[in-house]
Image: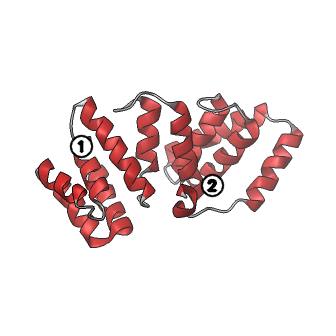
Amino acid sequence: MFFRRKLLRLSVICFGTMGASLVSLAQENADLPDLRRAYDLGEPGAALALGTALLESDEDAQWAQAIALLEQAASQGAPVYLLIADAYRDGLGVPVNLEKAANWYRIGAETGDGLAQFELGRMYLEGLGLTRDMVQAALYLQLASDRLTDPRLKEDAEAALAHAKWGADWKDWQEVKLLLQSWKPKRLSDLLN
């Protein structure tokens, strides 16, 4: 239920009332043909609504289609980068692809999303999907630690940050401090173009 409310709020922000009504339709288990028709007509928010509806399925083929639709919705400005990144990281409907997961986490991290920063920082720390880099790990983990409000996640980010600090030398940590001073969130639309 939380997931559905979150998507409804995202659709209103991204696509206005038409997108919200389409996502509402998807959440009320509307017929997929109605959502497909809306998508075929190019209605705003239809990719997000249809992708959302397909996530309710237990079939891998529908999940694969859902992820493709969510990627399309993301290219139109829907902030669904975490859903897409998690799908690629965990192989949900798509083959595991840590490079793509890191790219989607980076998009979210650069907009200032604390959870995306945490996940990207951990990927840098562990060298998953990208080259292990203690400076980048410490940068994103510090940003995440500053932004996360969930106590458990904040604690995890701080523990990972401590690990990154152990792997960085003094020069690396000075570079992290400079990067933190100059870091500013970017607009999602700028990152997708």
SS of the residue under disc 1: helix
Q: Residues within 10 Å of mark 2 (few under 14, many from 20)?
A: few
**Residue named by callout 1:** 54
In the rendered image, residue 25, in percent from the top left (x then y), is placed at 17, 58
Residue 155 in view of the camera: no
Q: Name the side, left or right, on which 154 lies relative to 139.
A: left
Taking the spot 26% from the left edge, 65% from the top edge, the residue there is 20
Report the amino acid beneath label 2.
Asp
Taking the spot 27% from the left edge, 61% from the top edge, the residue there is 42
**Outermost residue, bottom side:** 17
Residue 184 in view of the camera: yes
In the rendered image, which quarter contains the C terminus? bottom right
Q: Quadrant of residue 37?
A: bottom left
Taking the spot 42% from the left edge, 43% from the top edge, the residue there is 84
Taking the spot 76% from the left edge, 41% from the top edge, the residue there is 135
Marks 2/1 in contact by CB < 8 Å: the verdict is no
Q: Residues within 10 Å of mark 1 (few under 14, many from 20)?
A: many
N-terminal of the pair, mark 2 or mark 1, is 1
Q: Nearer the viewer, residue 126 or 94?
A: 94
Q: Which mark is residue 146?
A: 2
In the rendered image, residue 88, in percent from the top left (x then y), is placed at 45, 34
Q: Name the side, left or right, on which 78 lies relative to 163.
A: left
Q: CA distance from mark 2 to mark 1?
A: 35 Å
